[in-house]
């Protein structure tokens, strides 16, 4: 019989806590989505593309950029694209 504590960790018969292994993040999928959004904006939303680049260079975070886009356009799809594109820029700057 397995004993599970409040955090979801398994407790061995000896009383030792066995922590569950964390699943690896799908980093390649994230990178692909960010790059795809960056390239999509360049072709399909050049005004947003320029704005994301300018705001990122001015020191805005991806979340701040997305929040501004959502507030001004009420378009969550474009805000998400802009956030992902800004994350792409953030990774490229590292």
Image (tube, rainbow, N blue to C red):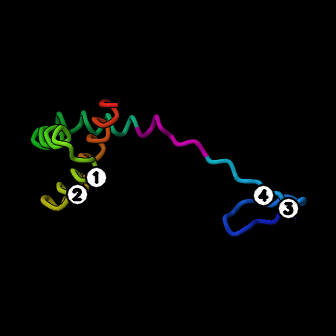
**On screen, 53 above or below 62?**
above
- Please tell me which residue is depicted at 26% across the width and 47% down the height of the picture: 61
Q: Which residue is mark 4?
A: 17
Question: Which residue range is magenta in the image?
Answer: 23-30
Tell me which corner region of the image, top left, top right, bottom left or bottom right, holds residue 54: top left
User: Picture coordinates of residue 91 (x, y %)?
Assistant: 34, 34
Q: Which residue is mark 1?
A: 63
- In the orientation shown, which residue stands out farthest toward the left? 47
**Number of the front mark, 2 or 4:** 4
Question: Looking at the image, do the residues carrying marks 3 and 2 touch, with CB atoms under 8 Å apart?
Answer: no
Quadrant of the snapshot with the N terminus: bottom right
Task: Tell me the CA gap for discs 3 and 1.
Answer: 43 Å
Q: Which residue is mark 2?
A: 67
Q: Of the numbered discs in the image, which one, if any, rests on residue 15? A: 3
Question: Looking at the image, do the residues carrying marks 2 and 4 touch, with CB atoms under 8 Å apart?
Answer: no
**On screen, 3 above or below 55?**
below
- Looking at the rendered structure, the secondary structure element under dot 1 is helix
Residue 35 as seen in the image, left or right of residue 54: right
């Amino acid at each position: 019989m397995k004993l599970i504590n409040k955090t979801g960790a398994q407790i061995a018969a000896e009383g030792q806590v066995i922590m569950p292994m964390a699943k690896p993040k799908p980093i390649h999928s994230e990178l692909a989505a960010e790059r795809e959004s960056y390239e999509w904006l360049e072709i399909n939303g050049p005004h947003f593309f320029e704005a994301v680049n300018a705001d990122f260079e001015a020191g805005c975070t991806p979340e701040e950029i997305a929040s501004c886009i959502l507030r001004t356009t009420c378009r969550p799809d474009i805000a998400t694209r802009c956030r992902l594109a800004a994350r792409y820029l953030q990774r490229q700057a590292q």
